[in-house]
Image: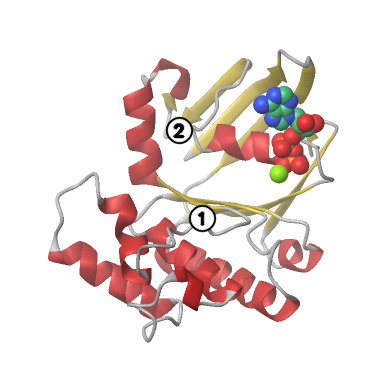
Amino acid sequence: MLLELTHVHKSYASPPVEVLRDINFQLADGEAVAIVGPSGSGKSTLLNILGALDRPTQGTALSDGCDLAALTEPELAAIRNRQIGFIFQLHHLLPQCTVLENVLIPTLTMKATPANRHRAEHLLKRVGLQQRLEHRPGQLSGGECQRVAVARALINQPKLLLADEPTGALDHINATGLGQLLIELNKEQGVALVVVTHSTELASRLPRRLELCDGSLH
Ligand SMILES: Nc1ncnc2c1ncn2[C@@H]1O[C@H](COP(=O)(O)OP(=O)(O)O)[C@@H](O)[C@H]1O
Ligand SMILES: [Mg+2]
């Protein structure tokens, strides 16, 4: 199992609030799932735990059978960098870097290789931006920036793509296109996909849907 959460609870101390209650969730290699739920229901908190950005207060989170609680912060950072690609509602591209440089940022902790550059170019071609390699984010549309963020998330060939409301800031046409792109990349690259979304249209196109409500996942 790529990910396995067992009896996971998450509370914040101040102000005291129990955000996740007894979450049990399994994700297989290459699987795709949508998570829907009202604002404040704990979707981002859950995604942060799946992405090893945060730890449960109670319960266990296993990644490939390995208990994330047993890992040190540098070990968790290595997992986040090598095995997980993150896409957020806002693209968080660096404005001073070109499109190509932005996609290569997750490779900076490794030795620069021509293979990384080729892969970045290949991914940018795949997301339809082969004519935009030297542009800067300020010269692109919102939909184009989000496609750069998708290429950046995939540069290290992760096993898991986590997307937190990735179409939330896009107009309808761009949102539909980006959702379609994520679904295609899940199949083509064999990367597992967890998408938190408010879009019932996008959720309905994924093979599995879960709802988070009052901290419980069903
Ligand atoms: N660091 C924090 N400290 C205290 N409460 C928090 C913190 N982060 C989130 N929360 C609370 O947890 C709840 C769930 O937040 P979140 O996971 O961001 O929900 P969603 O992504 O579904 O909108 C919210 O009520 C929020 O106020
Ligand atoms: Mg959120």
User: In the figure, is residue 94 to the left or right of 204?
Assistant: left
The answer to which quarter of the image holds residue 7 is: top right
The answer to which quarter of the image holds residue 26 is: top right
Cα–Cα span, label 1 and label 2: 26 Å
How many dots with numbers?
2
| First of labels 1, 2 by sequence position | 2
Say which of marks 1 and 2 sits in front.
1
Answer whether residue 215 is visible to the viewer in this image: no
- Kindly identify the residue that appears in the image at 68 percent across and 21 percent down: 10
Q: How is the image coloured?
A: secondary structure
The answer to which quarter of the image holds residue 114 is: bottom left
Does dot 1 land on a helix, a strand or a loop? loop
- Kindly identify the residue that appears in the image at 76 percent across and 65 percent down: 204
Ligand 1, seen in the image, is in the quarter at: top right
User: In the figure, is residue 164 to the left or right of 31?
Assistant: right
Q: Amino acid at mark 2?
A: Ser
Does dot 2 land on a helix, a strand or a loop? strand
- Kindly identify the residue that appears in the image at 60 percent across and 21 percent down: 56
When the figure is inspected, residue 204 is found, relative to residue 131, above or below; the finding is above
When the figure is inspected, residue 63 is found, relative to residue 165, above or below; the finding is above
Q: Which mark is residue 121?
A: none
Q: Which mark is residue 92?
A: 1
Quadrant including the C terminus = top right
Q: Which mark is residue 63?
A: 2
Q: Amino acid at mark 1?
A: His
